[in-house]
């Protein structure tokens, strides 16, 4: 339940089927990974509270994991309404999964989400960088054009996921003027769930932003 210092924030995850949306949520919430996870039907709801000690605030993330299959699209767009954060996920090995972010998912979120919705892009499965078909340079250029956060992520190796949610939440607080900007960009020593906010360093070239 949201309180004065525990702010409710609706998050929706979108993207093609099989890109790893559900795996991202399960890694983030439970620190679990299952290579054989079943695709989501329609949508599933989860919640997690994340503390921002530098602001003396907490965000209660109301997370909606939506199905990527085309047959569910007329239904899942209803879950975008009032979304404050839209997290778009693609598989770095599948070019179309990123192209559809540009031509479909980003437009859907801007149309149905909050007016000042925070957009984010996760380049998932970066542990499989040998098969990468979408360059980080291309994604970063698009992310900058729409003002989106971008992170390379790996559910299998737990790379970039905590950092992605942290950055989205911080931007949500700042954009909605729920905090000042005195600590903006000062992430050097901050930890999330006991981990440095900057994530793992030097493990995989593809997993560093």
Image (cartoon, grey):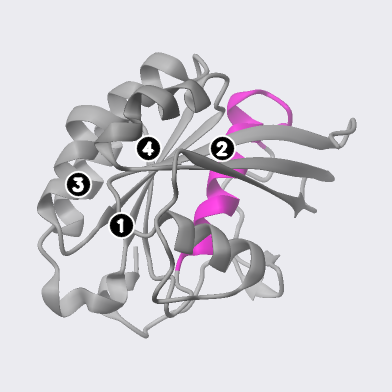
Q: Residue at x 89, y 33 (%)?
A: 3
Q: Does the magenta stretch mainly form a helix, a strand or a loop? A: helix
The quadrant holding residue 120 is: top left
**Residue 184, percent from left and from top:** 61, 43
Q: Residue at x 39, y 70 (%)?
A: 154
Q: Who comes first in sequence, dot 1 or dot 3?
A: 1
User: Could you tell me which quadrant the C terminus lies in?
Assistant: bottom left
Q: Who comes first in sequence, dot 1 or dot 4?
A: 1
Q: Is residue 134 above or below residue 67?
A: below
User: Could you tell me which quadrant the N terminus lies in?
Assistant: top right
- Label 1 with label 3: CB-CB less than 8 Å: no
- Disc 4, SS: loop
Q: Which mark is residue 19?
A: 1
Q: CA distance from mark 2 to mark 3?
A: 20 Å
Q: Which residue is mark 2?
A: 11
The magenta segment: 160-181
Q: Which residue is mark 3?
A: 98
- Label 3 with label 4: CB-CB less than 8 Å: no
Magenta stretch holds residue 169: yes
Q: CA distance from mark 3 to mark 4?
A: 14 Å
* Badge nearest the viewer, 1 or 3: 1
Of residues 181 and 140, which is closer to you in this image?
140
Q: Which residue is mark 4?
A: 148
**Residue 173, percent from left and from top:** 66, 34
Q: CA distance from mark 1 to mark 3?
A: 10 Å
Q: CA distance from mark 2 to mark 4?
A: 14 Å
């Amino acid at each position: 339940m949201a309180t004065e210092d525990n702010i409710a924030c609706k998050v929706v995850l979108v993207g093609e089927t099989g890109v790893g949306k559900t795996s991202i949520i399960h890694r983030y919430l439970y620190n679990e990974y299952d290579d054989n996870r079943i695709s989501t039907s329609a949508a599933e709801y989860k919640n997690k509270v994340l503390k921002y000690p530098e602001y003396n605030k907490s965000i209660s993330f109301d997370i909606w994991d939506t199905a990527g299959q085309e047959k569910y699209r007329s239904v899942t767009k209803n879950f975008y309404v009032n979304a404050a954060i839209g997290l778009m996920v693609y598989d770095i090995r599948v070019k179309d999964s990123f192209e559809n972010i540009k031509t479909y998912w980003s437009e859907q979120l801007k149309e149905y989400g909050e007016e000042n919705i925070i957009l984010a892009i996760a380049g998932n499965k970066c542990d499989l960088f040998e098969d990468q078909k979408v360059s980080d340079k291309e994604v970063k250029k698009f992310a900058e054009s729409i003002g989106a956060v971008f992170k390379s992520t790996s559910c299998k190796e737990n790379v970039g996921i905590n950092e992605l949610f942290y950055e989205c939440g911080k931007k949500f607080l700042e954009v909605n003027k729920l905090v000042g900007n005195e600590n903006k960009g000062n992430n050097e020593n901050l930890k999330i769930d006991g981990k440095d906010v900057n994530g793992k360093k030097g493990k995989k070239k593809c997993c560093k932003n």
